[in-house]
Image (cartoon, rainbow, N blue to C red):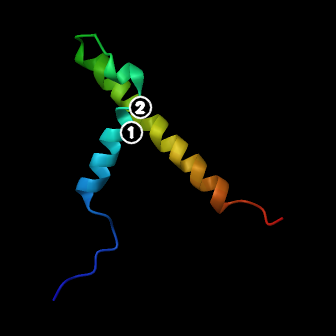
Amino acid sequence: MTEHRSRQDPRLIVGRLHSWTNNFGKHRRITDRDGAIVDFYLYLAAALITVRRLIQRARTHYRRPT
C-alpha cells in the first residue's frame, strides 16, 4: 500500500532553491575567501527569496474583496 504524500519531494525543493539563488549576481561573483562572508551572502539570498515569496502569497491570500 502506498502512502499519500501531501508534501513535495525534498529534492525538488532543494533544486528550486539552488536555481533561485543562482539568479543573485553577488552570489555568483563572490571572490572573498572568508567562509563567513560567503555564508552571509548565501543566507541573505535565502532570506530575500523567502520574503519575496511570502509577500507574493500575502497579496493573493489576504486581498480585500472588491
Helix or strand or loop: what does disc 2 sit on?
Answer: helix
Vertical placement of residue 50 versus 60, above or below: above
Is 63 displayed left or right of 14 in the figure?
right
Q: Quadrant of the C terminus?
A: bottom right
Front residue (pair 58, 19): 19
Q: Residues within 10 Å of mark 2 (few under 14, many from 20)?
A: many
Residue at 46% across, 39% down: 49
CB-based contact (under 8 Å), mark 2 and mark 1: yes
Can you say which quadrant of the picture contains the N terminus? Answer: bottom left
- Where disc 1 sits, the SS reads helix
Disc number lying in front (2 or 1): 1
On the picture, is 48 further left or further right than 56? left
Give the side of residue 32 with respect to residue 53, left or right.
left
Residue 28, by quadrant, is: top left
The residue at 22%/82% (across/down) is 3
**Which residue carries the number 2 mark?**
45
Q: Say which amino acid is labelled 1.
A: Trp
Q: Farthest residue in the bottom direction?
A: 1
User: Where residue 17 sits in the image (x, y, percent)?
Assistant: 34, 43
Please, what is the three-letter code of the amino acid marked with disc 2?
Ala
Quarter of the image for residue 22 reads top left
Tell me the tag on residue 41.
Answer: none
- Disc 2/disc 1 C-alpha distance (Å): 9 Å
Residue 48 x/y as whole percent: 48, 35
Left or right, residue 45 beside residue 1 = right
Mark 1 nearby-residue class (10 Å; few <14, some 14–19, many ≥20):
few
The earlier-in-sequence mark between 2 and 1 is: 1
Task: Please tell me whether residue 59 is drawn above or below residue 38 in the rendered image.
Answer: below
Q: Which mark is residue 20?
A: 1
Q: Residue at x 26, y 57 (%)?
A: 10
